[in-house]
Amino acid sequence: MDCIARSKEVFRLEMSEIAKVADRIDERINQVVDLIFHAKGKVVITGIGKTGIIGHKIASTLASTGTQSIFMNAAEALHGDLGMVSPADVVVVISNSGESTEILNIIDPVKKMGCPIVAITGNIKSSLAQKADFCLDIGIEKEASKIGLAPTTSTTAALVMGDALAVCLMEKRNFRPENFALYHPGGALGRRMLTKVKDCMTDVVPMVFETTLFKDIVCEVSIKKLGVTMVSNAKGVVTGIITDGDIRRAVQKHDEFHSLTAADFMSTNFKTIAADDMVNDALELMDLYKITTLAVVDKTKNNNIIGILHIHNIYGFRNL
């Protein structure tokens, strides 16, 4: 067997089937999103077997993107786990066939609690679809395997439908990156989104005057080891910046550079960031202007420069 060709065939088949499911999406998705968005309680995802595993993932995605959600195994629900469900909850039941005994056995108890039921099923004529208040159709024509028994395309369809719900709810809630960070404080993204510039900047500010000679500028940059120095005028007002790159370009441009002063080759249009801004904002600014250093200002003190933020400070801070 040519595994490369067969693998590509599996991908193409599943993409083709998912496209068919997408074409059948209708007004019911709006109804389900609105139902969940306005629910007073949480979303309870339930399923069994392979769809149960998919249900775990959907519940996790919803929970991490602003929608309170838990997963409940349908078989365990029959033996006490229905206690997880409260009348204000929305119950989402995932079943490809819509006829699994464990699934059908929890429908009546959930209805008695007064919870609306959303079915995600591949069989819109099934018992589950008929008993549910809302039904999302994930029906596929065939699984990826030749014998057609192992859930492959069907579980992919369920997963993508769950992702569609999560994305719609995220956008309806105006879920922001900083919100995401609160639920992911252990990840690199979360740490960047929750860390302020003042937490990882250095409060050492290399400084020279506009009249400082080239060799003394090089010394200041070298001694402070930040690859940069700020430049001020005689009144102490910061007027520019000199980076390692500016020094190299000055050497290449001028035959006689020893008599150069800071004013001769400093950059006046330097970028700043506030100490209370988030590190992620600093990274975006660095990326936008293709720079590695920002002057840090205190907005409460007339934007006085109080520190330097180098990209190495960011990635060296708690493994950001």
Image: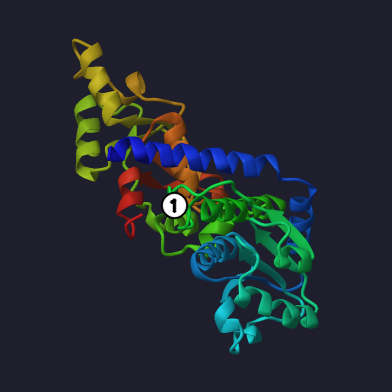
Question: Could you tell me which quadrant the C terminus lies in?
Answer: bottom left
Residue 296 is situated, as x and y percent measured from the top left of the image, at 45, 45
247 on left or right of 59:
left
Residue located farthest toward the top when viewing the structure as drawn: 255
Which residue type carries mark 1? Ile
- Residue at the image position 56 percent from the left and 42 percent from the top: 17
> Does residue 208 appear anywhere in the picture?
yes
The image's colouring method is rainbow
The one of 147 and 118 positioned closer to us in this rendering: 147
Q: Decide: few, some or many residues near mark 1? Use Cα within 10 Å; few <14, some 14-19, many ≥20.
A: few
As displayed, is residue 279 above or below residue 43?
Answer: above
Residue 177 is situated, as x and y percent measured from the top left of the image, at 56, 52
The one of 7 and 241 positioned closer to us in this rendering: 7
Q: Secondary structure at mark 1?
A: loop
Residue 222 is situated, as x and y percent measured from the top left of the image, at 20, 38
Count numbered badges in the picture: 1
Residue 234 is situated, as x and y percent measured from the top left of the image, at 41, 32
- Residue at the image position 53 percent from the left and 44 percent from the top: 303
Q: Quadrant of residue 127?
A: bottom right
Question: Could you tell me which quadrant the N terminus lies in?
Answer: top left
- Residue at the image position 41 percent from the left and 60 percent from the top: 187
> Does residue 236 appear anywhere in the picture?
no
Q: Which residue is mark 1?
A: 147
Residue located farthest toward the front when viewing the structure as drawn: 147
As displayed, is residue 71 above or below residue 37?
Answer: below
The one of 135 and 245 positioned closer to us in this rendering: 135
198 on left or right of 20:
left
Q: Quadrant of residue 116?
A: bottom right
